[in-house]
Image (cartoon, grey):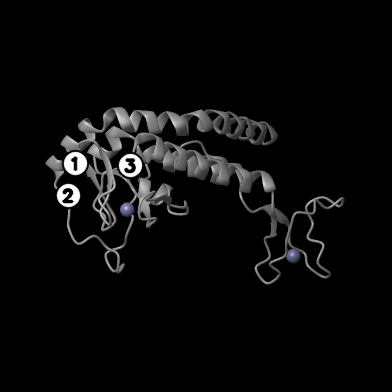
Amino acid sequence: SIETFQPLESSISDTERFKDTSSFILQCPSCHEKFPFGGIVASNHYMMSYNGVKCTHCEHMFTPLQISCQLERTIRSHISLYYAAWLVCDDSTCGNITRQISVFGKRCLNENCTGVMRYRYTDKQLYNQLLYFASLFDIGRNKKEELKPLYHPDDPDFPRTKLSSSQIQALSEQNRALFETLDSVVQKYLSDCGRRYVDMGGIFQFMLGN
Ligand SMILES: [Zn+2]
Ligand SMILES: [Zn+2]
């Protein structure tokens, strides 16, 4: 439907906009612990210091390259998932998943099924996923504490400590250069994806005679 191609909904919060996105999982190169990175926020697994991200399991300080490589690898895995172009039947009682593009169009090929095959990972989802990664390194969003939370309060991994607003302000400025580097990694892919996404939005508008 046309709703799925609305441009950036500026009025909705990051929590709502990014509710279906996957986390950016960092792995510590020293102790191999894996944990979600959610920007300058409290976590039981990492802490932001004045000069970068520190693993709290082993005190390893990530180099900028150790983060940017993992970020780039994560982005590429999402892009390949998108290009793998799995189709899923929209009839929930069918659940047919295939990479087969039917010569009969988008009709589900399961016998007696009237469902329509849709891309499991859409342009919009990929675009939104990249926007989520970009938000993590957005100094303004970090400062305003607008990022999507990593944990729900009833999550067993909910952080035991909290960062104060003044800590977040200071850490945002101290990590500005690092975050700008990481943001540029995301932007490199986001501009390609965004162009395609906006193009598709334009096509749909055109089809509706708008
Ligand atoms: Zn570690
Ligand atoms: Zn079906």
Q: Nearer the viewer, mark 1 or mark 3?
A: 3
Nearest to N terminus: mark 1 or mark 3:
3
Pinpoint residue 17: horizontal percent, then vertical percent: 42, 47
Q: CA distance from mark 2 to mark 1?
A: 7 Å
Nearest to N terminus: mark 3 or mark 2:
3
Pinpoint residue 168: horizontal percent, then vertical percent: 19, 41
Quarter of the image for residue 207 reads top right
Residues at circles 2 and 1 in contact by the CB criterion of under 8 Å: yes
Quarter of the image for residue 133 reads top left
Mark 2 CB lies closer than 8 A to ligand 1: no
Q: Amino acid at mark 3?
A: Phe
**Mark carried by residue 62:** 3
Decide if residue 50 is on the left or right side of residue 128: left
> Which structural element holds mark 2?
loop
Q: Amino acid at mark 2?
A: Leu
Residue depicted at 25% across the width and 50% down the height = 59
Quadrant containing ligand 2:
bottom right
Q: Is residue 10 visible?
A: no
> Which structural element holds mark 3?
loop
Quarter of the image for residue 206 reads top right
Looking at the rendered image, the quarter that the C terminus falls into is top right
> Which structural element holds mark 1?
helix
Identify residue for label 1: 168
Residue depicted at 14% across the width and 47% down the height = 164
Q: Are there few (<14), some (14-19), or many (20+) residues within 10 Å of tag 1? A: many
